[in-house]
Image (spheres, grey):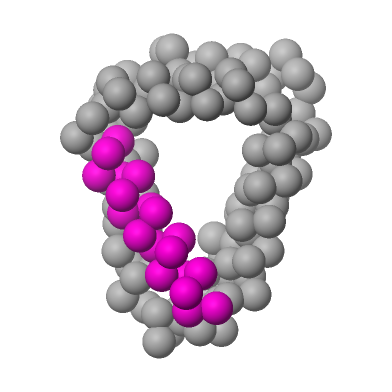
Amino acid sequence: MKIFLYAISFFCIVTGCCTILYTSGTRHFVKRFLNEVNRKIISVFEAAMGVLLLVSAAASQQPWFIRLIGLLAVIEGALIISLPRSLYDELIKWYVDSASDQTYRLFGIISLILGSAMLSWVQ
């Protein structure tokens, strides 16, 4: 499961860097992605990533934190599928249209920090 932790760590680092450096490009990519992909697929993917994080937490020096991130991902996957369509659409509309560039950069910084921390904790 180390390979999964390495992969998710590098993905978080790359996503964070792209979000910080190429904010408008990332915004357009996310908008296109969320409009084209069904929310059921997104929720199943999110929940699967959470379960994989829960399973791979033992390969980390801080398993409690990896389990916490995994649990949050499973909860997020369940929320995405259970939210009413109108509320989901409003949330996505805010994220891709109304959120400021500083908000995107903040999410990028958080992603970069989490990815770096997870990468340093792999045993």
Quarter of image, res 17: top left
Residue at position x 51%, y 84% in the image = 59
In-image side of 84 versus 73 (left or right): right
110 w.r.t. 10: above or below: above
Would residue 29 appear left or right of 94 to someone viewing this image? Answer: left
Q: Answer whether residue 71 is visible to the viewer in this image.
A: no
Corner quadrant of residue 97: top left
Q: Bounds of the magenta span?
A: 1-19
Q: Is residue 43 visible?
A: yes
Q: Quadrant of the C terminus?
A: bottom left
Q: Position of residue 26 (x, y in %)?
A: 34, 28
16 shown above or below 64: above
Q: Position of residue 80 (x, y in %)?
A: 70, 35
Left or right, 24 with respect to 78, comes to: left
The residue under the point 58% across, 67% down is: 53
What residue is drawn where x is 54% and y is 14%?
A: 93
Residue 95 is one of the magenta-drawn residues:
no
Residue 32's place in the image compared with 121, above or below, is: above
Screen quadrant of the N terminus: bottom right
